[in-house]
Amino acid sequence: MSDEKESYGASSIKVLEGLEGVRKRPSMYIGSTGKEGLHHLVYEVVDNSVDECLAGVCNTIRITINKDGSVTVEDNGRGMPVDMHPVYKVSAMEVIVTKLHAGGKFDKQAYAVSGGLHGVGISVVAALSKKMTVEVMKEGKVYAQSYKIGIPIDKAKVIGDCEKGLTGTTVTFMPDDTIFSTTNFDFNTLAMRFREICFLNAGLKIIFKDENNGKKEEFHYEGGLVEFVKWLNKARAVLHKPIYFKKALPEVTAEVSIQYTDGYNEVIHGFVNTINTIEGGTHVAGFKTALTRVINDYSEAKGILKKGEKLQGEDVREGVTAIISLRLREPQFEGQTKTKLGNSEIKGQIDSLTTAALAEFFEENPSIANVIAKKASSALKAREAAKKARELVRRKNVLGGGGLPGKLADCSSNKKDQTELYIVEGQSAGGTAKGARDKEFQAILPLKGKILNVEKSNPSKALSSEEISNLITAMGAGVGEEFDINKLRYNKIIIMTDADVDGQHIKTLLLTLFYRYVPQLVEAGHIFVAVAPLFKIRKGSQDHYVYSEDELKKTMAKLGKGDVSRFKGLGEMNDSQLWDTTMNPKTRILKQVSIEDAVEADETFSILMGDAVEPRRKFIEENGQYAEVDL
Ligand code: 1YM
């Protein structure tokens, strides 16, 4: 590392572009000017510190949300360079912060970087901040400089002394509220990301505080990916200790951890330079190919498969939890959200290194290899049974005529971009909804009651259950290999349940089904939850509907006293009440369901719907909005 230190000089900094463009088109640099873009600012600064950690010269990062709304990030790395820049004749610090693409990092061979902006992030953050201050400790001195929207307020100068051996960088920034639609940082969103960073960088410690409410979290995992996989599986019954390997090729370093559970879900998360590649890509594809090959070869060699039997990808991935983390010099990100790795050479490289490492592990750990091979071969049998069950469902539908479930009250329009399917809890509410709806574009599917918990049942059982098979048939797009989004019969799939404990539970069961079986519908934004009113206030001959206790207080204060009645369920409303409050596109409240963070969604569903009681109790205790869910 001392090499790096010597070779760095202010002269190696290249200057490519000014900062004006960043304020003109912030979304080009940070994705959006909403909540996500705001949080991105923090990640950009933290990425600089993580890069120091990757260089092996930093082990602790402190992040604080301050009382005034600013954020401070502090690391114990080498400290940003402060020597005089030979061309600009100002401190290197000023060049790094005020010039886009200023970074010695571009010259370095095999430079490991975190994040996506190659260390230009700090100047983007400066440009989008009302104020930013950088402090550097080096050689017994503290240097500092402040900026307003990326423009220096003063010269970089020594502001004091520090202990000789102490080094590090501290950045404090106040986001510009004329750029961002919100400037409130969310503790949990940031904490989730910091936890992920620490899992992906074994040994790194992040201490995170919010001065506004005293919240504090500390992340530090000596076991890295192995602990990541254990953490993801904490509410699942695992079949063996995690498998782990790390291999360095000239162009890429890959780290993998794998652990099977007794469940049915596939949880595979890929990361490239600590970016979560939600859309997958060549690294995940290479990994999957290798997994299928190695388990097939092993099962065949040990006689676990019958002659002629072959495991498919889905068989070997049943119940798997895996993390694939890559360090790659020139990642190409593709896809709708730029979270799909595109580098084509990576697929083969990851395939062969995984094949070699996993085959070796299987040879050395036959008891684990046997457990995995047997799990995959029983998945093969279940898949064949499920296929029969699906065929049965299809035949039944064909015989039943039309192919649609009898309980479905379909709409008449076939303009697929305008139609809606309401999934309604209970026969009586279903009846009311049928009366209330606009037949032209709204279809109703009543559910008998609670659907099967798919987190706890195998696909064959889940898909042959009447309620689930009705729902899948009504939606029209199929599941698994047969899924085809073009066959989706409705633009919006709307869950409409009572605003009580049972309703919450049914909603969670349905969301689990969608997330596990048709995640494509969630990703494409087709799934919605209708918000049902809690109270009706009658004032004179006028009815007012309110959706929360809070809103009730406010409305009562505005209207004066009325005779308030609490809705026990949707079924209690008459047709026109249900239309006004929950179904009329002009007045209803719909919440679109999205997967912001796939790791978090996996965790939530496994905890809420899985077997382990303790993590669920803890989760419900810590998450107010689920406190009412009776599981
Ligand atoms: C809280 C934010 O920016 N830390 C930080 C940044 C740099 C260095 C150390 C650093 C890097 C190198 C050499 C190198 C940066 N350096 C550059 C540039 N924390 C934070 N800590 N010496 C120090 O990469 O060779 C940009 S950022 F341009 F010098 F490379």
Image: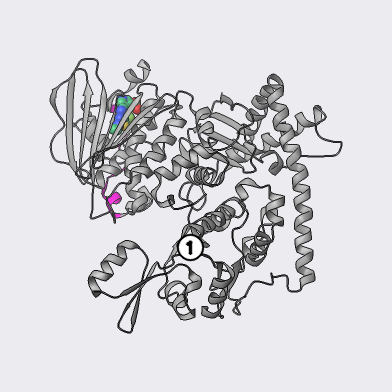
> Would you say residue 456 sits in the magenta stretch?
no
Tell me if residue 30 comes above or below residue 241 in the rendering: below
Residue 403 visible: yes
> Would you say residue 21 sits in the magenta stretch?
yes
x and y percent of residue 444 in the render?
58, 72
- First to last magenta residue range: 11-24
Relative to the observer, which residue lies in front, 481 or 131? 481
Residue positioned 45% across, 71% down in the render:
582
x and y percent of residue 289 in the render?
67, 38
x and y percent of residue 318 in the render?
66, 41
Location of residue 165 (image quadrant): top left
Relative to the observer, which residue lies in front, 345 or 304? 304
Relative to the observer, which residue lies in front, 416 or 111? 416
On-image quarter of the N terminus: top left
Residue 101 visible: no
Residue positioned 76% across, 37% down in the render:
377
Question: Circle 1: is it few (<14), some (14-19), or many (20+) Cα within 10 Å?
Answer: many
Residue position marked by numbered label 1 in the rendering? 529
Label 1 sits on a secondary structure element that is strand
Relative to the observer, which residue lies in front, 263 or 180? 263
